[in-house]
Every structure is written in C-alpha cells, then in structure tokens.
Image (tube, rainbow, N blue to C red):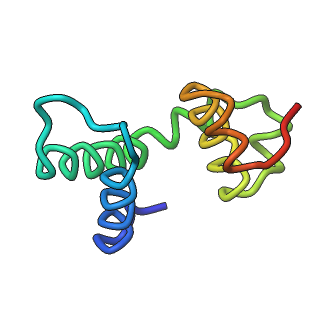
C-alpha cells in the first residue's frame, strides 16, 4: 500500500488541529503536518515488518484493511479507552 494522498494527509492534519486540548507546546501547524507526513511514510516503510510480526493465521488470512484496522485499534488504545471506543463503540 502506498502512502496516503496529500488530501488525506491534510484531513488528518486538520483533524488533529481541531482536537480540543490536544495541542503540543512549541509545535507549529507546519511541524504537525510534517509529523503526519513522517508517520504515514513510516507506516509505509514498515508495513512488511508489521505483517511479519503477526501470527501466521492472521497474516495469511486477514486482508490489508483488516491488518490496518488492527494496527489502528492497538494504537488508539495506547491513547486511551475513550479513543478506542470512539472508533469501535463498545469494547468491554
């Protein structure tokens, strides 16, 4: 899978800027956009390593979309339960 189109990266950037209380001190809008771009590039560069880390049954049977959703779910939970619930609804 290739990196996201610029329009999608911009959507992420705008969404992050809208997060009330989520600002990072001493980080400009340009810095935030560069962080979005770097994160997307990192995901693209490391997708093979992620796939290889998965259990064989999941790796061989899940679609790329399912693997990406798994990655997102774990990342969201690292932010907090509320973030995961916004994405998936009830998770308990």
Q: State the image quarter where residue 75 is shown.
A: top right
Q: Residue at x 32, y 61 (%)?
A: 14
Q: Does residue 16 lie above or below 25 as drawn?
A: below
Q: Residue at x 73, y 53 (%)?
A: 66
Q: Residue at x 21, y 52 (%)?
A: 33
- Please identify the quadrant where the C terminus is shown: top right
Q: Residue at x 32, y 48 (%)?
A: 41
In the displayed structure image, the side of residue 17 where residue 61 appears, left or right: right
Q: Position of residue 43 (x, y in %)?
A: 42, 44
Q: Nearer the viewer, residue 63 or 88?
A: 88
Q: State the image quarter where residue 78 is shown.
A: top right
Q: Does residue 58 lie above or below 5 as drawn?
A: above
Q: Position of residue 61 (x, y in %)?
A: 83, 50
Q: Position of residue 20 (x, y in %)?
A: 39, 45
In the displayed structure image, the side of residue 62 where residue 47 appears, left or right: left
Q: Position of residue 87 (x, y in %)?
A: 68, 50
């Amino acid at each position: 899978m290739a990196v996201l189109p610029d329009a999608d990266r911009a959507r992420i950037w705008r969404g992050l800027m809208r997060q009330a209380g989520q600002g990072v001190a001493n980080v400009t809008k340009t810095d935030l956009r560069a962080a979005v771009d770097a994160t997307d590039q990192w995901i693209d560069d490391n997708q093979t390593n992620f796939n290889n880390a998965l259990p064989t049954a999941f790796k061989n049977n899940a679609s790329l979309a399912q693997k990406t959703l798994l990655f997102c779910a774990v990342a969201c939970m690292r932010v907090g339960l509320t973030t995961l619930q916004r994405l998936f609804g009830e998770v308990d």
